[in-house]
Image (cartoon, rainbow, N blue to C red):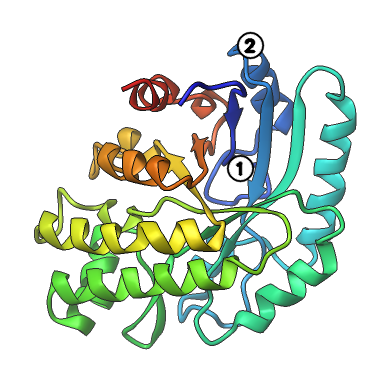
Amino acid sequence: MPLSLKWDGHTHTKFCYHGSSAESEAYVDRAIELGFHRYTISEHPPLPAAWLPDERLMAELAMPEAGLPQYMDYVKSIKQKYEGRIQVTTGLELDYLQGSLSYTEAIVDRYQHVLEDVVYSVHYLPGVGGMRSIDFTPADFTANLLSYYGTMEKVVDEYYNHVEAAIEWASGLPMRKRLGHINLIEKFVKELPPIDEAQIKRRLTAIVPLLAKSGVGIDVNTAGLRVPTCGKTYVPAWFMSACSEQGVELVYGSDSHRPEHVGFGYEWFEAQLGR
């Protein structure tokens, strides 16, 4: 599968409060330096009120309601500034919000005239006291998810159930869409009870035809390589090959939260496509 377009399809901005306060020019300049042709800005939008029991964590994970129009104006200004030098596309990393899909639908309806890319991710599962983040800390995962489900096998199955539901919902989006970091459940694999690789392979194998049928692509997210508790990409190489064989779009994503993250792991992505 030759690469005709060098594209970083998953990046963040100063509107991400668990990232960097750097302006997006620093990110885009880095992308240009590395020879990228397209750069998608895909920030986390607001979450529904009281989505998580922990208000402090909510403030860290998502921008406030008032921030969304400001973000959209900001991305528009970056697009205009770099026109003719690199293609900057307007995106969001939307969340699959079980029981609150109408919240996301309202965001899409409001901005679908400008939204070019959607990374659709599963960050939350039902847990102790309500919805819980799967990627905050190992201790939080243990206290609020593992204790709730009882075993890693049950947590993992629930996660992939959400992924399958996310693919079905995203299939109706009118813009480019891809499933974000499909194996984010492995973020803390080095500090939590082991996950059965056979279980992961079984669930991912069943997901490939769902992606092919839906027109939803895959965010080949390399951020796990720079996470000490993970140490591997969030998309296995064998899964990339299976998706490619079924015509599923594969889009590299640095998931950059700092300018120096842009382009991280691209060589790995390129090498897998060349096999």
* Element marked by disc 1: loop
Q: How many marks?
A: 2
Q: Is residue 21 above or below residue 96?
A: above
Taking depth in this image into account, of 244 and 110 the one nearest to the observer is 244
Residue nearest the viewer, comparing 114 with 20:
114
Residue that appears at 87% across and 25% down? 83
The amino acid sitting under disc 2 is Glu
Question: Helix or strand or loop: what does disc 2 sit on?
Answer: helix
Question: Which numbered disc flags the more N-terminal residue, 2 or 1?
Answer: 1
Q: Nearer the viewer, mark 2 or mark 1?
A: 2
- Residue at x 9%, y 58% (from the top left corner): 194
**On residue 12, which mark appears?**
1
- Residue 69, horizontal then vertical, whole percent: 84, 59
- Looking at the rendered structure, the kind of residue marked 1 is His
Q: Which image quadrant: the N terminus?
A: top left
Query: For mark 2, what is the residue?
Result: 33
Q: What residue is rendered at 80% in x and 17% in y?
A: 85
